[in-house]
Image (cartoon, rainbow, N blue to C red):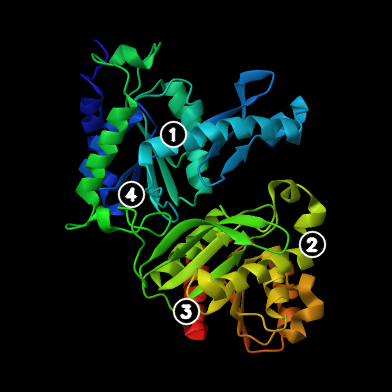
Amino acid sequence: MGVARFRDRREAGRRLAAALAHLRAERPAVLGLPRGGVPVAAEVAAALDAPLDVILVRKLGVPYQPELAMGAIGEDGVRVLNRDLIARAGITDTEIARVEAAERAELERRARRFRGDRPALPLEGRTVVIVDDGLATGATARAAVQVARAHGARRVVLAVPVAPPDTVAALSADADEVVAVVRPTPFYAIGQFYDDFAQTSDEEVIATLEAARARTDPPGDDTASRPGPSGTTSTGQAAPAGSPIDREVEVPTEDLCLPGRLVVPAGAVGVVAFAHGSGSSRHSPRNRSVAARLQQAGIGTLLFDLLTPAEATDRRSVFDVPLLAARLDAATRWLAGTATGGLPVGAFGASTGAAAALWAAAEPASPIRAVVSRGGRPDLAAARLTLVRVPTLLIVGGADPVVLQLNEEAARLLGGPHRLEVVPGAGHLFEEPGTLETVAELAAAWFRRHLT
């Protein structure tokens, strides 16, 4: 008996969709691996009535053996590294940075090419279906699964029309579920199972994504009048006062400007500056998730880098709370001025960023009106806690006993109104299902109350 074949990628997608019908109730996000996976994913998304996007990953090859992956990168600064391999191979941070810079440039080029100025589909807390036109070794698919998890996906399903049985078995350790319509033996190449396996062009990917957006966008949605990334409409005219803002910004501090993204929904009651923790940046998936919830609650957000790339690799800078606080203070003063038309300002800090937020809030004439700390290190700002007079919410995971004790001690020192919230079962990073959503809800309620 011959092995089943597919006429083309579209037919393969329809047959794959039938095998994924059980996911429809989960309202998943469907992500196609460009280029060949996108037409397959489009059929899956249509059948599941799900939104469609691309998932962009780039392999990080070992410098002297590029075909050997030492990790992978995804959008928004996501990086997954094989630390064991890196240690065994003696690869330096400088070599990793050099490889990553080249691959990230290509990744960002592809993102602009395929999406234009549209944001990536948010994955936090969702079931995500990653689709390709087939698997051979599965290296790219494995990287895509890791990137989706780093973006906060609750459950990851890897789905393809065809893959060899051993690859399916190996990837079952990475994805929550692996679905393959046919699993032939022997397996030589993906193309042998398609009558038409012509290369998919960039133009076909773009057209497929646009068609999927037309299917899922609300009726009457007029993208031509939607404010663009720089706070203007797509026609280039300035957005009228009170219009939403969504743009890349340069945040001025005393000694330099720091990159960030400012998002202010229409009719916002205030704006919150985020201070990320050690080893993180403005691309932090957790802070982005909380920021999205604040925006839904009518609160603007500023996600920005507290450190330059060189400083971020220096442990002394990472834990230099006065430096971090000075930059956050400058950012909040900028926000309270002309940047947002004088909206009330709050600060959200994580880990060392929480210490910076508390330190900055203690500054004389600070514009910060409320602070929320997630898994914070208030002990790093202990000398200033009695000077913090603004309402402060300390959120700590119940399964993070050391940090919980530090916050209990800090609560006794705070000079203004405050509350300690313990999220049951949550660890330091709030990776457990539903815990980060709890943080976001608590933060939104706190800022809505104290910024209005």
Residue identified by numbered label 4: 28
Amino acid type shown at disc 1: Arg
Residue 217 percent location from the top left of the image: 24, 53
Q: Residue at x 41, y 75 (%)?
A: 268
Horizontally, is 390 left or right of 93 in the view?
A: left
User: Residue 445: x percent and y percent?
Assistant: 47, 79
Label 4 vs label 3, nearer the camera: 3
Residue 445 image label:
3
Q: Residue at x 54, y 71 (%)?
A: 272
For marks 2 and 3 on the same chain, the one whose residue lies earlier in the sequence = 2
Please name the residue shown 48% across and 29% down the image. Answer: 140
Q: Earlier in the sequence, mark 3 or mark 1?
A: 1
Residue 253, image x and y in percent? 68, 63
Report how far apart the C-alphas of labels 1 and 4 lie in the structure.
24 Å
Q: Amino acid at mark 4?
A: Pro
- Whether residues under marks 4 and 3 lie with C-beta atoms below 8 angstroms apart, the answer is no
- The residue where tag 2 is placed is 320
Which of the two residues, 163 or 124, is positioned nearer the viewer here? 124
Above or below — where is 19 with respect to 196? below
Q: Earlier in the sequence, mark 1 or mark 2?
A: 1
Report the front residue among 437 and 109.
109
The picture quadrant where one finds residue 246 is: bottom left
Amino acid at circle 3: Ala
- Looking at the image, is mark 2 or mark 4 nearer the viewer? 2
**Which residue does the numbered mark 1 point to in the structure image?**
110
> Is 375 positioned to the left or the right of 179 in the image?
right
